Image (spheres, rainbow, N blue to C red):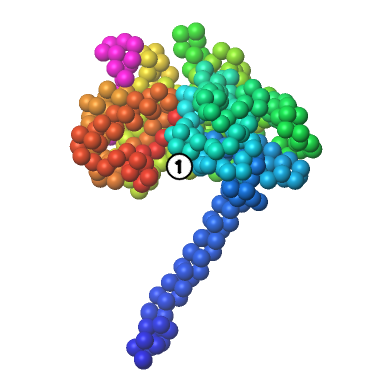
Amino acid sequence: NNLSMDLHTGRGSAIWAIVLAIASANILFFIYSGFVIWWKRRANGIKNKYKFDQAEFILLVGSENGTTFRFAKAIQDQLLKNGKTAFMAELNNYKNFPKAKQILVFAATYGQGDAPTNATKFKSLLKKNPQSNQIDFSVVAFGSHAYPDFCKFGYEVNNTLSHEEWAKPLQEIHTVNDRSPEEFTRWATLWAQNSNIELSQLSKLLETKPVKTLPFKVVEKTVSSQEETSFIIRLSPQKRKKFTSGDLLAIYPANDHRERLYSVGKMGKDVQLSVKLHRDGLGSGFLHDLEVGQIANAAIVRNEHFHFPKKAKTVIMVSNGTGIAPFLGMIDQFGRVQDIHLYCGFRNQQSFALYENAINKETSLLTKLNVAYSREGEKRYVKDLLLRDQSLICETLENSGVIMLCGSLSMQKDVIALLEDLCQQDQQKSISYYQSRGQILMDCY
């Protein structure tokens, strides 16, 4: 009994009392932090007044970053105001809805016409769970005209539903460019007419809080040419703002809801961006037209999943084209203390020349630099260099190292396919295992 009392209270030992005090403080901290995390998830999660088997209106959402949910939420609120029963869920949670009269799909397209992560299972679930009643459906597809596969996933969902015997289209598929409230309202107005729903203050429900921007001064910018359309722009924040390489810079070129994001390389106290100028590109055109000394308003967006892994002994960075930007910043920030291998792909020597001076300055901070040219010399892609060094790649993953990818989605697909093959050959764990452990980090576009 005395021993138990001593162990639980620290009686008779000052050192043990301190240990118990620290442990108690940690327990309180974990209780508090756990509650905060739970509350934030609850606040940002889907809230339903009715269960899936009670609702007549089913709202299904496919969204990679969550922005599409606010459009579905606005319609859900309108339905509840009209005394209707509504249930909202991710597309991956599709099932049999026994009382459903309408299914409304809010489908964003991710990457190169792909399904968002929370919608990848929808097509297979649709085949496994045919509805028992005749149900009207309507699809509103979200995308951007800046990409060739505009709203591709939304069209696929609409086409798939059209071939279901129980599904009847309420109206034609409607597309929304760049999350435009006006374009969405046009769909909502027609849907409300077809459904005998009274819309009230929809525009207010779609309003978003204005993003807090900061002034940035252009301190340096390279000149693009007809042969080389990429350029580097360096911006100095005019107010103190904490950020690091791998974060994103959000710009609003037209001073409206349209947002463009660029991966940040932190060089000293400045933001450095690498940008490819696109014909009629809203964001790239805006940045290209800025002059040295000019002020531009922008916002720093934290992108913690792509921050440099400070605890990893070995980091392999893989990029193509303008995707090298955050890596140049990371090498400048952290290259002195860690084993870093940079693999970068460019079309030719002229494309590489834009970054050559910066890379030469950082060569001493790198363990090894590997450059692939796809349109001259041996005409190799960055994946070919990784295949050549497959033993290093496998050893890095086995020894808790990290592989980071930044660049085009086509490069990402090729590299991930290669990594899957290497893991199978080397009898390692699956790619998803390493992704879940934060050993494969990606920021591709």
* Residue 153 colored in magenta in the image: no
Closer to the camera in the image, 323 or 161: 161
**Picture coordinates of residue 52 (x, y %)?**
58, 47
The reply to whether residue 365 is in sight is no
Closer to the camera in the image, 172 or 151: 172
Q: Quick check: 108 left or right of 200? A: left
Q: Is 302 located above or below residue 114 in the figure? A: below
Q: Quick check: 297 left or right of 411? A: right
Amino acid bearing label 1: His
Q: Is the stretch drawn in magenta largely helix, strand or loop?
A: loop
**Picture coordinates of residue 249 (x, y %)?**
56, 33
Outermost residue to the top: 226
Quarter-wise, where is residue 7 in the image? Answer: bottom left
**Picture coordinates of residue 333 (x, y %)?**
42, 39
Residue drawn at the location 34% of the way across and 37% of the way down: 403
The residue range painted magenta reads: 367-381
Label 1 neighbour load within 10 Å: few <14, some 14-19, many 20+: few
Closer to the camera in the image, 387 or 126: 126
Residue drawn at the location 26% of the way across and 13% of the way down: 378
Quarter-wise, where is residue 8 in the image? Answer: bottom left
Q: Quick check: 301 left or right of 84? A: left
**Picture coordinates of residue 290 (x, y %)?**
61, 21
Residue drawn at the location 42% of the way across and 30% of the way down: 406
Residue drawn at the location 58% of the way across and 37% of the way down: 133
Q: Which residue is mark 1?
A: 305
Q: Quick check: 138 left or right of 32? A: right
Q: Is 159 located above or below residue 339 in the figure? A: above
The reply to whether residue 163 is in sight is yes
Closer to the camera in the image, 112 or 378: 112
Quadrant of the snapshot with the N terminus: bottom left
